[in-house]
Amino acid sequence: MALVPRSKVTPPPIPTQHIRRRRLEAALDRGAERDVTLVCAPPGIGKTSLLASWVGSDVGVPTAWVRLEPEDGDPRRLWGAVLAALTALPEVPAASRIRRLVVSRTTVELDFLSELLEGLATLPTPIRLVLDDVQHIRDSLSRHA
C-alpha cells in the first residue's frame, strides 16, 4: 500500500474561534443511521470544521477520516487513502479482510470494491468514514472528461 501522509487521514484541529453547531451535529447523528450522509454547502461555510467537531465530540464511534485533494480523482489514490484510514483504526481487527486488501497499481476493479464493502459489513463495530472535500474528486473528474 502506498504511503499516505498522516495529515490526510486525521481530522484537522478545530479552530479556536469555532462555534459548535449542535443542531447540525444532531442532524449528522440522525444521518449516521443511513449508509451515506452528504454535507453540501458553498466553500468557506465551515463543513470541515463542523465534521471535525462532530467527530471529536463523539469519541465512542470509530471514525476513518480522509481529506481529499484534486489528485484523488485517480481511483488508486482515493482507495489507497481510504484503506489507510480504515486500517489505522484499532476497531478493524487484524483478521479483517480489509487489512488484506491491496489497491492495484493499474486500476481499481469492481472486485476490490465488493471486497471492501463486504469487509466493512463484517466489522464487529460500526465505523464512520468521513470523506472531506469530495468536490475535489468531482472537479478532477470533470477536467479529465
Image: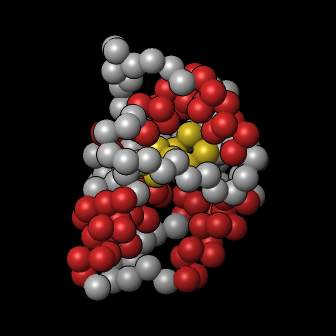
The residue sitting at 32% across, 46% down in the picture is 43
- Taking the spot 28% from the left edge, 56% from the top edge, the residue there is 69
Q: Pick the residue in front: 64 or 136.
A: 136
- Tell me what residue is drawn at x 43 percent, y 65 percent: 79
Figure check: 35 above or below 109: above
Q: Is residue 91 visible?
A: no
- Which residue appears at 61% of the width and 52% of the height? 37
Q: Quadrant of the N terminus?
A: bottom left
Locate the C terminus by quadrant: bottom left
In-front residue for pair 59/5: 59
Q: Residue 54 location in percent, x, y?
A: 55, 29
Picture coordinates of residue 123 (x, y %)? 71, 52
Q: Is 96 or 21 nearer to us in this picture?
A: 21
Kindly tell me whether residue 16 is visible in this rendering: yes
Which quadrant would residue 135 be assigned to in this image? bottom left
Q: Position of residue 4 (x, y in %)?
A: 31, 52
